[in-house]
Image: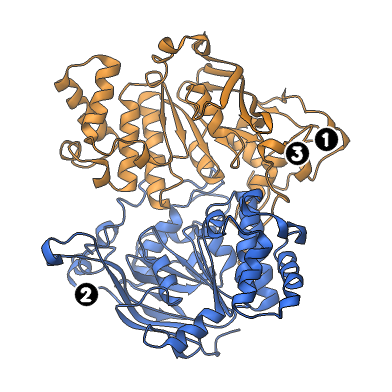
């Protein structure tokens, strides 16, 4: 449906390394945190893409780099065809006017001293979205759009629940009338019963406003519900990327398969694996050689360690970065686990 | 599962605030058998953490008090013990692990020493024996190179390893019961799966009974034997995991199982529970869930439903429970 359109935002081979603290006298031995190691991603207008991965995989850093909040070490980010970088203030300005972020912790993302109405009005004024006298009306509109009683405009964040605060956060993001929203773990801090409400709100907004959404989450089942496409990240690289249903039904990268398999299902008959994925992601200070997943991979061969990291291969719009073809991985159970309902294989 | 050796009866916790005294844990009762894993499920503010802290008399603020309730281990009411006597219960008979191990481990003490300290306190072992025991415990919780790692500091451990170290610390006193307060919530799913497996192994190997506090029904389904659902400081429903998940009778339990994002096509709407959980200073009258309940009848707003036995080792507090046949088990349909 959105295949032919030009991308709204595009990252091309983005590398982002942060200097690590310490490093001896004069910082001579300073190491760097290798947060992003060659990420390419393009998002088309109207598309919802989920970025998933374990903590430290670089999904939040990628979100920040796309928004121009971090300057990239190498590579390019372009928004609406215009390069985004510190050297191009015009590009940055357009980006800031047309994008918005929804943060993880709704309570902390709002100014405790401003009422909800003031917090939203602030955005409208800064961006000159509506003439002064109409600000109040627009605030009320935005609050009803996110399913809140406009009367709440007079309250301060402290008097609201977490779910209500997150709705205010979304209203603030929508106030910019953004072309792109980046939502970073925006339901992780909410109770399950409220999570569903927020996900449904995003689904509604997506349909009504043709919103482009980059949804960063560690919860795969939520991404599966909400996103058209999903990109799985591991240690600063995209290891798999494709249409959500395809990725979940038949993951091609062993990491994706293991990640999906680790989700505890509410059906007690779908049991967690006998031997869950071993270990934890290595430190991004010190990346493993070759494919960075090889130390935890159940199928790793000598080549995985020796050869340079595999690049994303594509087939039917579904890319994966592994030297194996999907059929070669001897793990029939992993691929089908999320789709089976009754019997366990 | 031999009979209940751990019983909690009418446990109540009050909080004194500027707006008066509020009951945040209201007559919570449950039992735990030897080697059983009980899941304590509820949203934030449901009182699940407070109830467990009260069991250990570990309330985090002076504003909180325990006006009533009995906690029996092997028939002995430990709540009635004086503070000095209670110290032989806390830690020794009931261990506890927390969501954020980093803030519950001493950052300037080596992991092995912390564990050895507990071994010496509870068992009076010699320094050398305690250190050997610490290494043994680290081995049991699956820390690689335990001897080497016991000399490490908490900041040198990754999140999952820290949680393992905290489990080792809780086991140092050889407790019968382990209270685990959202121990996997801050961990990645892959590491969570490892910790869940470890807890199951410890249960099988040592006959450890576990109270597992969580808001994640998936974790409960995988780990627990029985489930106790809390809402607004009260128990809604308690029963065997399989019957409770497949056939929830309390509308809140049914709502929770329904709003799991697990299955369902991309773009399809999630079922939700309307409204928001109550705050402690504005608890609804009658059944505390009634303003959000689709099954609510007149009585719900006026009368607190009694907590009754409904057969099959199940107890329920609801005036108008979900009817079994109509329980289209939301989203999945497993029987």
SS class, disc 2:
loop
Cα–Cα span, label 1 and label 2: 66 Å
Residue picked out by circle 2: A308
User: What percent of the width, then of the height, locates residue B320?
Assistant: 81, 35
Work out whether disc 2 and disc 3 sit on a shared chain.
no
User: What percent of the width, then of the height, locates residue B71?
Assistant: 54, 16
Mark closer to the observer (2, 3):
2
Q: How many marks?
A: 3
- Determine whether, in the image, residue B164 is placed left or right of residue B5: left
Please indicate, yes or no, whether residue A224 appears anywhere in the rendered image: yes
Instruction: Tell me which colouring the rendered structure shows.
Output: by chain
- Determine whether, in the image, residue B142 is placed left or right of residue B223: left
Name the quadrant containing residue B85: top left
Name the residue: 28% across, 75% down: A310
Please indicate, yes or no, whether residue A211 appears anywhere in the rendered image: no
Residue picked out by circle 3: B324
User: What percent of the width, then of the height, locates residue A70?
Assistant: 38, 73
Residue B301, numbered label: 1
Work out whether disc 1 and disc 3 sit on a shared chain.
yes
User: Upstream in the sequence, badge 1 or badge 3?
Assistant: 1
Cα–Cα span, label 2 and label 3: 58 Å
Q: Single out the residue that lies furthest toward the right.
A: B298
**Chain B representation colour:** orange
Mark closer to the observer (1, 3):
1
């Amino acid at each position: 449906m959105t295949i032919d359109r030009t991308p709204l935002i595009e990252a091309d081979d983005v590398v982002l390394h942060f200097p690590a603290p310490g490093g001896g006298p004069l910082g001579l031995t300073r190491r760097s945190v290798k947060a992003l190691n060659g990420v390419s991603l393009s998002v088309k207008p109207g598309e919802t893409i989920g970025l998933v991965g374990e903590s430290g995989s670089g999904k939040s850093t990628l979100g920040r780099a796309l928004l121009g909040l971090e300057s990239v070490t190498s590579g390019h980010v372009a928004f609406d065809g215009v390069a985004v970088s510190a050297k191009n203030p015009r590009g940055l300005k357009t980006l800031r006017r047309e994008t918005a972020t929804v943060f993880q912790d709704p309570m902390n993302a709002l100014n405790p001293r401003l009422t909800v109405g003031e917090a939203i009005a602030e955005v409208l004024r800064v961006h000159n979205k509506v003439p002064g006298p109409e600000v109040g009306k627009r605030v009320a509109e935005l609050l009803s759009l996110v399913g809140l009683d406009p009367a709440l405009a007079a309250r301060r964040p402290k008097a609201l629940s977490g779910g209500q605060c997150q709705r205010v956060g979304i209203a603030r993001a929508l106030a910019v009338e953004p072309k792109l929203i980046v939502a970073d773990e925006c339901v992780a801090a909410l109770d399950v019963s409220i999570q569903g409400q927020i996900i449904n709100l995003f689904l509604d907004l997506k349909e009504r406003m043709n919103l482009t959404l980059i949804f960063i989450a560690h919860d795969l089942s939520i991404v599966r519900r909400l996103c058209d496409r999903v990109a799985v990240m591991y240690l600063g690289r995209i290891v798999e990327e494709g249409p959500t249903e395809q990725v979940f039904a038949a993951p091609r990268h062993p990491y994706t398969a293991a990640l999906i398999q680790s989700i505890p299902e509410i059906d007690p008959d779908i049991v967690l694996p006998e031997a869950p994925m071993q270990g934890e992601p290595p430190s991004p200070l010190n990346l493993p050689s070759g494919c960075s997943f090889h130390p935890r991979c159940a199928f790793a061969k000598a080549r995985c360690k020796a050869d340079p990291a595999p690049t994303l291969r594509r087939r039917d719009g579904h890319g994966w970065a592994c030297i194996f073809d999907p059929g070669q991985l001897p793990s029939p159970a992993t691929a089908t686990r999320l789709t089976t309902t009754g019997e366990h294989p | 599962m031999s009979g209940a050796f751990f019983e909690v009866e009418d446990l109540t916790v009050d909080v004194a605030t500027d707006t008066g005294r509020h009951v945040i844990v209201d007559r919570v009762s449950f039992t735990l058998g030897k080697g059983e894993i009980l899941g304590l499920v509820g949203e934030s503010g449901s009182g699940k953490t407070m109830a467990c802290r009260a069991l250990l008399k570990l309330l985090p603020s002076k504003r909180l008090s325990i006006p009533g309730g009995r906690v029996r281990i092997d028939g002995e009411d430990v709540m009635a013990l004086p503070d000095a006597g209670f110290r032989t219960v806390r830690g020794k008979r009931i261990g506890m692990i927390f969501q954020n191990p980093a803030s519950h481990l001493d950052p300037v003490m080596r992991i092995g020493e912390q564990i050895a300290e507990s071994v010496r306190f509870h068992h009076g072992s010699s320094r050398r024996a305690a250190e050997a025991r610490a290494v043994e415990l680290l081995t049991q919780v699956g820390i690689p190179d335990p001897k080497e790692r016991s000399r490490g500091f908490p900041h040198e451990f990754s999140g999952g390893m820290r949680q393992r170290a905290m489990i080792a610390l809780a086991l140092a006193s050889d407790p019968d019961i382990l209270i685990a307060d959202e121990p996997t919530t801050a961990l990645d799913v892959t590491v969570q799966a490892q910790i869940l497996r470890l807890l199951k192994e410890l249960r099988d190997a040592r006959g450890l009974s576990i109270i597992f506090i969580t808001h994640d029904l998936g974790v409960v389904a995988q780990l627990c034997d029985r489930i106790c659902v809390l809402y607004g400081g009260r128990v809604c429903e308690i029963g065997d995991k399989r019957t409770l998940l497949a056939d929830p009778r309390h509308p809140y339990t049914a709502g929770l199982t329904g709003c799991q994002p697990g299955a369902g096509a991309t773009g399809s709407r999630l079922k939700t529970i309307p409204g928001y959980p109550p705050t402690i200073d504005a608890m609804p009258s009658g059944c505390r869930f009634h303003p959000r309940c689709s099954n609510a009848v007149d009585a719900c707003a006026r009368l607190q439903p009694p907590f009754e036995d409904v057969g099959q080792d199940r107890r329920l507090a609801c005036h108008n429970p979900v009817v079994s046949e109509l329980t289209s088990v939301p989203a999945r349909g497993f029987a």
